[in-house]
Image (spheres, rainbow, N blue to C red):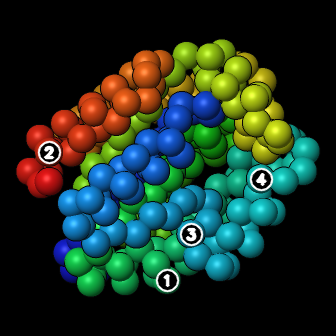
Amino acid sequence: MPNKRGYFITLEGGEGSGKSTQIKKLDAFLTEQGVSHHITREPGGSPAAEEIRHVLLSGQTDKWDSISETLLFSAARRNHLTQVIWPKLEKGIWVISDRYADSTMAYQGYGRNDHLLSRSDIEVLYRITAGDFKPDLTFILDIDPQKGLERAQKRAHLDRMEGQNLSFHENLRRGFLDIAAREPNRCVVINADQPENLVHAEILTALKERLHVC
């Protein structure tokens, strides 16, 4: 694991939780504060990982089972870490990511719930991929799955994950909340079912309280 100097911050949540909007607002805020930072996403974030992203998110909802998905996500993550995240952090640059490993645990470990892959299996695979490296701070944007899907369906196209049934998304929400309960020092749950400016304000408050910066 590299000697990390910058902060690694991740935003997680179900479909339609407003992560993209909040990352744009956080990007603008950090720019105003003069904080050197890099915005990225998972799956993706590096050229090779973006290729895997296309493979993962396109096609039918049953295209991959949980084992196949998790292996592909892990391959993309390893490339993302070695090519982008770790080098940026070593230079003192903050990295803000739209999704990271919590999404793999929530989607494949809770959402799929197909018993092909246990949560402990996913944890072992993560350790192989990233060692004991974890985000400094994770914001979990929480919203009722039905409301989140209604938001997502306003987009022109739904990807494979967005197209899963409501039961999948309910499992997903339980997964994120369980992750937050297990790691309260890292995770902050934000009510995403409120005006976006209020969500942004809560994120900034937590950022200052948890990392003592900005």
Query: Whole-percent x and y of residue 178?
Result: 41, 28
Residue at 76% across / 36% down in the picture?
A: 155
Query: Whole-percent x and y of residue 78?
Result: 53, 73
Whether residue 135 is visible to the viewer of this picture, yes or no, is no
Q: Earlier in the sequence, mark 1 or mark 3?
A: 3
**Pointer 4: what residue?**
57
Q: Secondary structure at mark 3?
A: loop
Residue found at the very far front of the displayed protein = 32
Q: Quadrant of residue 150?
A: top right
Q: Quadrant of residue 95?
A: bottom left
**Pointer 3: what residue?**
45
- Amino acid type, callout 2: Lys
Query: Whole-percent x and y of residue 16?
Result: 61, 31
Q: Earlier in the sequence, mark 2 or mark 4?
A: 4
Which one is in front in this view, the residue at disc 2 or the one at disc 4?
2
Q: Earlier in the sequence, mark 2 or mark 3?
A: 3
Residue 95 to residue 97: above or below: below
User: Marks 2 and 4, how far apart in space?
Assistant: 34 Å
Q: Residues within 10 Å of mark 4 (few under 14, many from 20)?
A: some
User: Marks 1 and 3, how far apart in space?
Assistant: 9 Å
User: Marks 2 and 1, how far apart in space?
Assistant: 29 Å
